[in-house]
Image: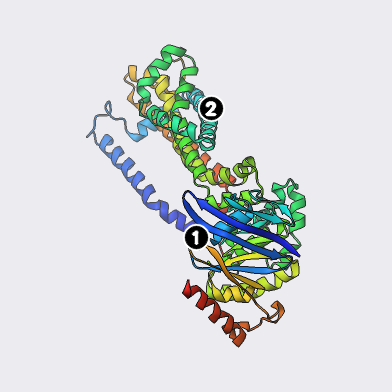
Amino acid sequence: MRKKSANITDKLPAAAAIVLIIALWQFLCSAGIIPHYMLPSPLEVITAVGKDFPNLMMHTAVTLQEAFLGLLAGILLAFAAATLMDRFSVIQRALYPILIITQTIPTIAIAPILVLWMGFGKAPKITLVVITTFFPIAVGLLDGFKSADPDSLRLMRSMGATDMQIFYHVKFPSALPYFFSGLKVSASYAVVGAVIAEWLGGFEGLGVYMTRARKAYSFDRMFAVILVIIVISLLLILLVNILRDLSMPHLRADTGKQK
Amino acid sequence: MQLLRAEHITKQYGDKTIIRDISVHLDSGELVSLLGLSGAGKTTLFHVLSGLVTPEEGRVFLEEEDISGKPGRISYMLQKDLLLPHKKIIDNVSLPMLLKGTPKKEAREKADPLFREFGLEGTQYLYPSQLSGGMRQRAALLRTYLTGNRAALLDEPFSALDTITKSQIHEWYLDVIGKIGLSVFFITHDIDEAILLSDRIYIMTGRPGEIHSQIKIETARENRKDFTLTDEFLTYKRRIIKTLREH
């Protein structure tokens, strides 16, 4: 009970700051200090979401699908790469620098090339999401595998454990917290990655919707898309947190020690 | 009867010889300590005995079978309890059985009755973070026992505990070890602990480490209540301190 109320107190400053900023924004717009064709007021943004809701949701579903598929493929690839790099140090030495280099390539620069190669369908969007989400997860997992206590590995070997058993019982569980930290970053990258790829060509998705709104100088609808992206990114992070708590119940165990 | 025997063990890391020409043995049901200053190569000797590393010279025998460089035949417990934080205590202690292919349910059923014996009743479904240091070491010892090997190597298992917990656990340890009939090789740098918990003590000195001498403790394990206050205890202690100072 005390924990719960402490939690609320913790979050109070952030909530207050957000409310204050939105109130200030609304005031600046309503008072006519900022012309509304440059910056729509929060109320106008919400109205824009409401007015075009079914259409917006249709596009959201497409973007979410791309983000999910890309993220899933990114996770699988990252898992394979991290496992191989952990197992064979030669592979780690060969791949790690390349991994870093891929991270320095700006997403916005590579997206048009992907569209040229793969056309206007979903493939370039999913690929871009894979590229952006792969790195944080792969690096997180690799660090996690390496974080396993060497004494634990020694103990497992002294009990006659095989490499697979050591991986299953010690290395993988040690890597889970790192994996979820990486996943949290990647989950928000995934949505942004999909939207950026959609900007550069396509038929549906939040990026396409945004481009159309921009061409019509419809600022309120552009902000509406931003609002939707924020909400789904937050929901994804929440989902990751729930998954993390479910897969690591020992972190939530009451630590009142037994004597 | 000799259960475990190591003959003329020499182990080097690179050019550096860590231990030289060491021969030790452990009889069935015996508690033997390996006492020496830090850096004498005690842990290295244990790595050799457990089969985790292969010695340059010498062999290790378990009941006449050569087990040099073959891990899994002798149980090993370290100073850190090394309980896996994501597994409940019952799954931690039954891990050695799981590794050998015993189904989880069956392993739990075998482990469960021993919780009472080890003073761990009620902790079966807790996580390691919910237990005190002393309880965690008890769980680690139960896991060591459930490895199913007759001989165990204990590397400073109680050195991380506070003094009061330590003295409580010493008494408990002698009692439970006697009941389960485990033969134990025990590393410590605590002279009192060595005398209190052993039938025999090897004193290790020098760099590279060698066995300097051994001491047999005459008082039976069952009669060691308040043993630390007796003249006999102090005589052993003086002898050991003298040896360690001279080398």
Asked if residue B26 lies left or right of residue B78, the reply is right
Residue A132 higher or lower than A211, as above or below: below
Which part of the image, by quadrant, shows the C terminus of chain A?
A: bottom right
Residue A117 higher or lower than A231, as above or below: above
CB contact under 8 Å: marks 1 and 2: no
At label 1, the amino acid type is Pro
Residue A49's mark? none
Residue A144 seen from this side: yes
Residue A14 higher or lower than B211, as above or below: above
Q: Residue furthest bottom?
A: B231
Relative depth, front residue between B156 and A57: B156
Q: In the image, residue A209 lies at what x, y percent? A: 42, 20
Closer to the camera: disc 1 or disc 2? 1
**Label 2 packing within 10 angstroms: few (<14), some (14-19), many (20+):** some
Which of the 4 quarters of the picture holds residue A247? top right
At label 2, the amino acid type is Ala
Report the number of discs. Answer: 2
Relative depth, front residue between A68 and A221: A68
Relative depth, front residue between A48 and B134: B134
Say which residue appears at 70% left-offset and 82% top-offset. B223
Name the residue beneath numbered marker 2.
A73
Q: Are marks 1 and 2 on the same chain?
A: no
Residue B208's mark? 1
Secondary element under disc 1, as helix, strand or loop, is loop
Distance, label 1 to label 2, CA atoms, is 54 Å
Say which residue appears at 36% left-offset and 31% top-offset. A44
Secondary element under disc 2, as helix, strand or loop, is helix
Q: Tell me which chain the residue with mark 2 is part of.
A: A
Q: In the image, residue A95 lies at what x, y percent? A: 45, 30
